[in-house]
Image (tube, helix red, strand yellow):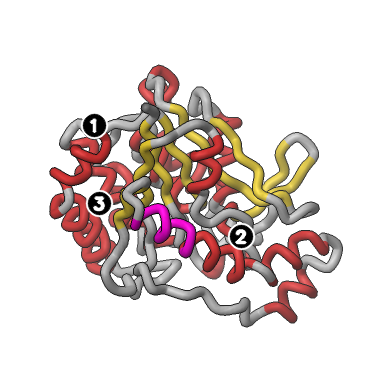
Amino acid sequence: MKKGLVMEGGAMRGMFTCGILDVFMENGITFDGAVGVSAGATFGCNIKSVQPGRAFRYNKKYCTDKRYHSVSSLIKTGDIYNVDFCYNELPYKLDKWDIDTFSKNPMEFYCVATDIETGKAVYHKCLTGAKKDIVWIQASASMPVVSKPVEIEGKKYLDGGMSDSIPLKFMEGRGFDRILVIETQPADYVKQPQKYMPLIKCMYRKTPGMIKCMADRHLMYNDEKRYIREREKTGEVFVLRPKEPLNIGAIEKDPAQLERVYKLGREAAEANLSQIKAFLN
């Protein structure tokens, strides 16, 4: 039996995921492999480095800091989340990511990015937590329109949530047969078509694959939600998700809102702790 973890993104809805992961780490719940998308990757990597509280701590501390995210950063650099601060200063100086533990932990960890030429999902296995892995995690979380594409080995990537928002099928394809899924939207949430397609068609006119990916994203997302519900009904996957919309901003600057959503994640995990342990064992 291979135990897998799937983590949806959703910008600061990811505080819900942080709360769940912290409960897991505090209770010795481990996995053989995990995959994170966007915020599910940037926050979820802390389960492999075994750092409970870290993602919640630095988000709460720096959410009002213009070095972290701001319109001025978007104007000056093309990234609303300042790349140098988020992926250099923060993990290596201000709130250190334990890459030594990350590299030694045998748990597999994947992040998902979208190739802007093809509009297809690319899955990167993070091995050491070194700079190459950080750049892939950055790509996974680089939201279209408000982020520049991230170049890696001659190819350019954006947010993995555009092409594979909740990669349960990916983990099943890797041989994981006891899988827990963390969603950041309620069970009955239905994604609507992208409202800003005229802007997207203008911005990504040279990459029609990305335009098609974003135009079809709601179809992909809703299909994945349906598939997960089907697998959940048969008991083949265990799902943790909010009961109601989290109603938190993608660029949330209120620490109280971050804490509220984080606590909802903790409550969801704690309320299901015995069932989770039974499912995984």
Residue shown at 52% from the left, 68% from the top: 222
Coordinates of residue 57 in the picture (x, y in percent): 27, 48
Tell me if label 2 and label 3 are in contact, CB under 8 Å: no
Tell me if label 3 and label 1 are in contact, CB under 8 Å: no
Res. 184 image quadrant? bottom left
Where, quadrant-wise, is the C terminus in this rendering?
A: top left
Examine the structure image and report whether residue 45 is included in the region drawn in magenta.
Answer: no
- Judged from the image, the secondary structure of the residue bearing numbered disc 3 is helix
Where, quadrant-wise, is the N terminus in this rendering?
A: top left
- Residue 281's disc number: 1
Q: What residue type is disc 3 on? A: Gly
Residue shown at 47% from the left, 63% from the top: 225
- Judged from the image, the secondary structure of the residue bearing numbered disc 2 is helix
- State whether residue 110 is above or below residue 117: above
Q: Earlier in the sequence, mark 2 or mark 1?
A: 2
Q: Name the residue nearer the viewer: 83 or 107.
A: 107
Residue shown at 44% from the left, 21% from the top: 103
Q: Name the residue nearer the viewer: 4 or 42.
A: 4
Residue range highlighted in magenta:
226-233
Write down the residue under mark 2.
162
- Asked whether residue 77 appears in the rendered view, the answer is no
Q: Earlier in the sequence, mark 3 or mark 1?
A: 3
Q: What secondary structure characterizes most of the magenta part?
A: helix
Q: Earlier in the sequence, mark 2 or mark 3?
A: 3
Q: What residue type is disc 2 on? A: Met
Res. 66 image quadrant? bottom left
Write down the residue under mark 3.
19
Examine the structure image and report whether residue 232 is included in the region drawn in magenta.
Answer: yes
